[in-house]
Image (cartoon, coloured by chain):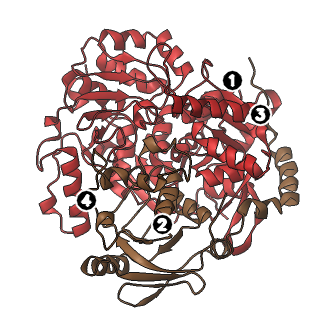
Amino acid sequence: MSLTMFDKIWARHVVAEGPGGQTLLYIDRHLLHEGSAAAFTRLGRAGRRVRRPDLCVATADHYVMTSPGTPVADAEIAAMLESLSTHTAERGIVLFGRGDVRRGIVHVIGPEQGLTLPGMLLVCGDSHTATHGALGALAFGIGSSEVEHVLATQTLWQRKPRTMRITVDGRLGAGVGAKDVILAIIATIGAGGGVGHALEYAGDVLRAMSIGERATVCNMSIEAGARCGMVAPDETTYAYLRGRPFSPTGEAWDRALASWRALPSDAGAAFDREVRLDGATIAPTVTWGTSPQDALPITGRVPDPAAIDEAGRRQSVERALGYMGLTAGMPLTDIAVDRVFIGSCTNSRLEDLRAAAAVAKGRRATVPAWVVPGSGLVKEAAEAEGLDRVFREAGFEWREAGCSMCVGMNGETARAGERVASTSNRNFEGRQGKGARTHLLSPAMAAAAAVTGRLTDVRTLLR
Amino acid sequence: MSRQAFTRLTGVAVPIDLPNIDTDRVIPARFLRKPQGSAGYDRYLFHDVRFDADGAERPEFVLNQPAFRPATIVVAAENFGCGSSREAAVWALMAYGIRVVVAPSLGDIFHQNSLKNGLLPVILPADVVAGFRRTLHARPGTTMTADLETQTLTGPDGTAHHFEIEPFARQMLLTGQDEIALTLGYEAQIRAFEVRHLAETPWLALSPPRA
């Protein structure tokens, strides 16, 4: 019988078939951050222990300050950070805390450290956990109760989702990257298109991508409604993983590799749904509204709600345009921005910073522009290449690693009414601060917006 | 985890018309550092669309209209609860008094979080749910009834609709059972799995990193 990669990984993790169609799955890796603290507290209150602290790894990302130097947190945030340190220390869980160069955004450091491996089942109390699917892992986000359940039992009750394969054929044009691909996918299937599905991304465009670029695509699976999304491992994957701190070595590597090579979906495997896109038709893409599905080629115009028949959709677009302060029919390139954010678990890896720096180089930011590397090691690697100098000379602010203005939990937010060109993943109302307006785009497009002060087709700046 | 049992509820239903209501809108990020159940938690629900900058109620927001104020049932549109995994979205709804969310579809993580806490998700066809919302707007303050034992939702017009729910989730909600306690009863299977899994995939064991 032909199986999908998802079917194979799922089958390898079945502990028991439970009552009522639920399956008890074993969790290979559990990543934790400051937001996981409440689960530890409830666990302790119930008198329960962490079953496998050796399979947990924690980092501080959501609440840390990313301003240069030694940031001072307010009392509430300091308590969140302290709580994570205490809980992990008491239970012997590895923590990449403040001062550790390995600290960074949880979805950046998993792959970077070789903590994420093909074929594993990985969870984290964060909806962007699908990022780890870039390495061929089954990875999904869970809520606080499920975090507590995994801590106590190293398992989760799940119902098997349906499968969807999204194939992007052909080749991307110049100035078009992974972010444009995933925004185009979300615009195609909709913000709820992947609900109840496990996604697999396939096709020539995905094959040609680096692991960091695949991470960008998998990261936003949740913005299409899907808890998990993945790419089959291949030689790119193995080359990436070889020699990472937690990657297997020697005989273990050879055994792992043989196992990983058997993971990709079989030739005749059937998916519940298939979607195809032509990579050559994807343009640099930006969002205009307050849902990630509100994405259009930069050459487009702000939609006109009057032209929409369906009442719910029309109402949504009207509200979005009101919130975003946009006029129907205006060219997207007429939209002036107030600030730029380059970072987040979607776009803070070395290849992202390189793409942004290539545009920034020799130019000058006309609005405040932040660059927030995904981890301490990404920051170091970027500095070794001189990218920090390129950004600084172009008037961008080079900051410490963290989630920063993607989520705004640490107080790093935009002001009400401010318009942000952002490489993050969510343009929801208030996401980057109460009343803040977000346009999602790629790192190259964000840098282009920084130097021109408006949404700009980066292809016009390519040399 | 603490799950409130659910059997049957009759209460005022409030319509939330927009599709893709994300959990950032249900509870903004700046409140996530507040402990679950702390004083005033109910005010975080839909905070930035419910209150203005001075903390005064926005009269146009549906929950601020007197007839909808006592709502215990939300009737939403497609993909309600999408986005962030924050379980605080469920905590805020329940702190307000909401025990049932009716929608054509829910964000997957929100759906799971609802079940874990005792917030009943009722998935029904989009046209049926849209009909409920229209009726609720026309007759604010109308009640609906959710009966988990019979898996029946009674709309504001009195029509009864059968809804599907996984048997496992249904049983958990009816009894309010502690799911971790249940799973700990599978310890022998978990242990046996671990031995086999470690033998088959020894590289997944997490040893200290190399320098």
Q: Secondary structure at mark 4?
A: helix
Kindly identify which residue carries mark 3. Answer: A90
Report how far apart the C-alphas of labels 4 and 1 lie in the structure.
Answer: 49 Å
Q: Look at discs 4 and 1 and give the one toward the viewer.
A: 4
Q: Is residue A254 left or right of residue A362?
A: right
Q: Look at discs 1 and 2 and give the one toward the viewer.
A: 2
Q: Chain of mark 4?
A: A
Q: Toward the viewer: A180 or B8?
A: B8
Q: Toward the viewer: B198 or B22?
A: B22
Quarter of the image for residue B6 reads bottom right
Q: Is residue A145 left or right of residue A445?
A: right
Q: Look at discs 4 and 3 and give the one toward the viewer.
A: 3
Q: What hue does chain A carry in this figure?
A: red
- In the image, what residue occupies the spot 45% across and 25% down? A351
Kindly identify which residue carries mark 4. Answer: A316
Kindly identify which residue carries mark 1. Answer: A243
